[in-house]
Image (cartoon, rainbow, N blue to C red):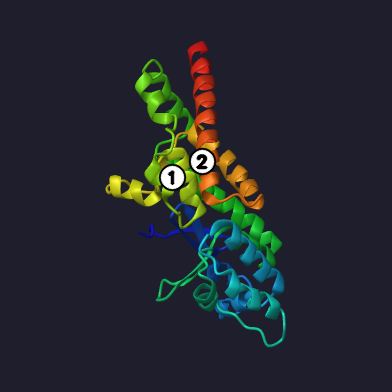
Amino acid sequence: MMAKQKEIIVKDTTIRSFSLNGWDYICITDIARQKNALEPKDVVKNWMRLKNTIEYLGMWEALNNPQFKGVEFDPLLREAGSNAFTLSPSRWIELTGAIGIISKAGNNGGTFAQRDIAFKFASWVSVEFELYLIKEFQRLKEEEQKALGWSAKRELAKINYHIHTDAIKEHLIPQEIDPYHRSLIYANEADVLNVALFGMTAKEWRDAHPDDKGNIRDYATINQLICLSNMENLNAVFINEGLQQSERLQKLNQIAIQQMTVLENVESKHILKA
């Protein structure tokens, strides 16, 4: 289910965003209004005609989308940049099975891109606008974190309260992946990380917590977020090394267990000394 859209104001321009399956998406149609307020769709299409853009989009999908259609992508890359080449966001999605860009119809629609792609587009529109956008988007994410109740101060207070209970440690330190989750093929890399660290996919978490707002990562502890950040970098390295998804999942799960054990032990010692 798609989360409710949120808005930030960047240089007097309203920019919409939402989260889906652990990814943050930003409306590049809104960003394009900086360049052409009347026809922002044309700005997006012009950007997607560029060879550098197609190369970047293809690389992002190859790293993050196991269902990306590389065979359909190759002709687009060859033709990109030529005078006759045109490509709309919806056509890109239809041809390649892309997940980094989402096209929404209707009055509240537009083209939304995963935040790394959106920042790339913003830098093409205006380097100055990109910097303001990143600053405001980071502020939005910080406010969301505080609203969901896991600011560092509150989280440390929770851990301090439960510091002598073995149950909380057993809950926070990941378990080895069960055979069922080990055998699955995951549609996106976000769920590979989710299973490695939390033991479940984003959908499984939503099904188990139908009344909670946000997603599984919104309820992570500070230590889990630190571990997740490390795992994202390592997963990119594993992908570049050509490791299969199942092998990467196994490695990431062992790393999560090791890192969370260390982080929990270090934090416990710090709190006991305080």
Residue 235 point in image, percent of width and height: 59, 46
What amino acid type should be assigned to the residue bearing mark 1?
Arg
* SS assignment at label 2: helix
The image quarter containing residue 107 is: bottom left
Residue 117 badge: none
Q: Would you call the spot at circle 2 few (<14 residues within 10 Å), some (14-19), or many (20 or more)? A: some
* Residue that carries the numbered disc 1 in the rendered image: 182
Q: Is there any visible trace of residue 114 in the rendered image?
A: yes
Label 1 vs 2, first from the N-terminus = 1
* SS assignment at label 1: helix
Residue sitting at x 60%, y 51%: 135
The image quarter containing residue 108 is: bottom left
Residue 250 badge: 2
The image quarter containing residue 229 is: top right
Query: Which quadrant is the N terminus positioned in?
Result: bottom left
Q: Is there any visible trace of residue 209 in the rendered image?
A: no
Residue 38 point in image, percent of width and height: 56, 80
Tag 1 and tag 2, C-beta contact below 8 Å: yes
Residue 259 point in image, percent of width and height: 54, 30
Count of numbered badges drawn on the protein: 2
